Amino acid sequence: MLVNNPKIPRTNRTDSLTRFSLMIRDRFSLEEDKADEAGIIQSISRGIEFRGVNLWTLIFAIFIASIGLNVNSTAVIIGAMLISPLMGPIMGVGLGIGINDLALIQRALKNLSIAVFISLLTSTLYFFISPLHIAQSELLARTSPTVWDAFIAFFGGLAGIVAGSRREKVTNVIPGVAIATALMPPLCTAGYGLSIGNLYYFAGAFYLFLINSVCISLSTFLIVRFLNFQQKEYPSPDVEHRVRNTIWVAVLIVVVPSSYLGYQIVRKTIFEQSAKRFVTAECNFKYRQVIIYNARFNRQQSTLELSLIGEPLPTDSINLLRAKMPAYGLDKTNLVVKQGNLKDTEIDVDALKTTLANQVIQYSQFTIAQKDRTIDSLRRYINLTQTSHLPVSDLRNELKTLMPDVQTFSAARSLVMNASSNKPDTVMLVYAKFFRKHKVGEKRRIERWLQTRTQSKRIKLVIE
């Protein structure tokens, strides 16, 4: 917010804002390198028709994508998306709406309908004769569209039409848009649903294709209007009104259900993460083990199921677990504990193998670490014992050479405790008895000799 300052003239502030506005407008302008309007329309129109080469390319791409989904190969699916010519009529619909060209809209919708029919027919035929009928992860990923798919298609469509409106085509944008928006795999998945009679798969996959198509057309429409393409006049106001109403209906069909599905997926993800945290933090029992847990999300009441082996978990402990669940965001979750006879329990064998393998690895690592600590402790004890063993007889003979009047001699390493500290100190305690009384200088001479001979700096010499 600007604050009026009498020292800064209003004219200077206005000029600064104008320059800043012009700089931002120039930086984000789409007019630079823009192709002529007629060239853009002609380029998009050429990709609308599905006949000859375009039609055969579509069929081949459908077969490739269907095979990729069938064998769960991401690379093959990406290749099919790059080959697919489906983007043409979808962008044609958005262009036609943007310039009010009813004939272009009808032609694009007609060719898009042909492409969709051919795609469904081809993919259904492939999956009907394919010996592989298991729905792999790549295929299942196309059966549950959400609002994020709408965002991806919308921004991908923006990038596609902006790149397509340049004089010098940006070669890496269109392939990237084709991969990101994924028009081909949903149609193949819909064909798979038809081939096995699964209407849920068909509806989810076809709805995903509808989301992508509407959002790409919408983004094309917005950029065409933003670039101020010359608009034609509709034959009548009634036709214009019907076209606009159709656009709004299509947008609502895409946004409302996909937003709801996206919200439910967010709730499911949060629930699964909370269940995992709860099991990890609170379900470490003594004399019993959680072999598998199953977190099932439901809009009304979710369920967390624990399968235990070992001693039965008391009812009080189960009630205590239920009392702790609200702290993890699981207050509306039903806790089911299965223990004892697990004969009727559905157990994920792979997950159980993973759990047992992890436990074996953890136990082995703990056992190895414990043995390493024992070995280190024994090694330190041996070293201490070896270093504690002093050649007392040799030291006595050497001391007798220095001090012939030595009568008794003893040496050993000892722990000395200070009254003000609990930490013991190690010193070499040496006791010697002589026939005569020695002076202080002679005592120091003996101490220096002992330090050099035993390589010990802390010597406690007691002379009697």
Image: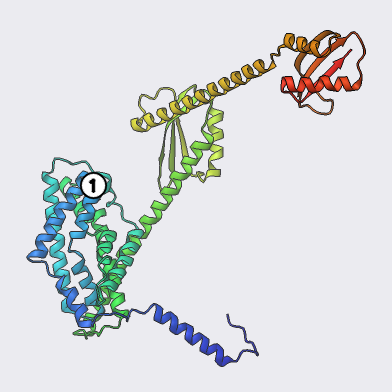
| Image quadrant where residue 108 sits | bottom left
Q: Residue sitting at 13 percent across and 43 percent down? A: 130
Q: How is the image coloured?
A: rainbow
Dot 1: what SS?
loop
Q: Residue 356 appears at what percent x and percent y? A: 41, 27
In this rendered view, identify the residue nearer to me: 313 or 160.
160
Q: Residue 359 appears at what percent x and percent y? A: 45, 28
Q: Quadrant of the N terminus?
A: bottom right
Q: Residue sitting at 14 percent across and 51 percent down? A: 124
Q: Is residue 155 left or right of residue 105?
A: right
Q: Is residue 43 above or below residue 374?
A: below
Q: Is residue 210 left or right of residue 372?
A: left
| Image quadrant where residue 49 sits | bottom left
| Image quadrant where residue 377 sits | top right
In this rendered view, identify the residue nearer to me: 170 or 307.
170
- The residue pinned by badge 1 equals 73
Q: Is residue 389 left or right of residue 183?
A: right
Q: Quadrant of the C terminus?
A: top right
Q: What count of labels does the image hold?
A: 1
Residue type indicated by callout 1: Ser
In this rendered view, identify the residue nearer to me: 169 or 234.
169
Q: Is residue 153 left or right of residue 438?
A: left
**Can residue 235 be spotted in the picture?**
yes
**Can residue 191 be spotted in the picture?**
no
Q: Is residue 274 above or below residue 165?
A: above
Q: Residue sitting at 50 percent across and 41 percent down? A: 277
Q: Residue sitting at 34 percent across and 30 percent down? A: 349
